[in-house]
Amino acid sequence: MKCFDKSAEVFAAGYALPWYSVERTTRAWRYKDHIFKTPVDVPVERVSLAGDELDALHMESYKHEPL
């Protein structure tokens, strides 16, 4: 598992972090200053951010609209 101290480090490594969403069919993500949604079944990786384990979406592995 990759470990980071700050969210800026996560973004610099090419990962999006989870963003609050109440929908059951999609997941919301934050990548730098952009918020976007993916289907809930998109594969994610686990990363550690300041000691907390989180799901993270690697931007290169997900085909998305340009941000």
Image (cartoon, rainbow, N blue to C red):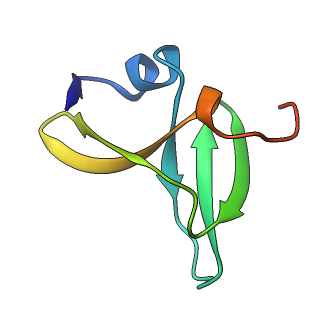
Give the x, y percent position of residue 52.
17, 46
> Dividing the picture into quarters, in which one does residue 23 lie?
bottom right
| Relative side of 15 to 24, left or right | left
Residue under the image location 53 percent in, 66 percent down? 20
Taking the spot 58% from the left edge, 72% from the top edge, the residue there is 21
Out of 57 and 5, give the one closest to the viewer: 57
Q: Is residue 55 left or right of residue 34?
A: left
Q: Quadrant of residue 2?
A: top left
The percent coordinates of residue 46 (x first, y second) are: 29, 44
In the depicted structure, whether residue 64 falls above or below residue 27: above
Q: Quadrant of residue 45?
A: top left
**Nearest the camera: 16 or 5?**
16
- Residue in the picture at 45% in, 49% down: 44
Query: Quarter of the image containing the N terminus?
Result: top left
Q: Quadrant of the C terminus?
A: top right
8 relative position to 4: left or right: right
Q: Residue visible at 50% across and 14% down? A: 12
- Extreme left residue here? 51
Report the side of 10 relative to 32 (left or right).
Answer: left
Count numbered badges in the picture.
0
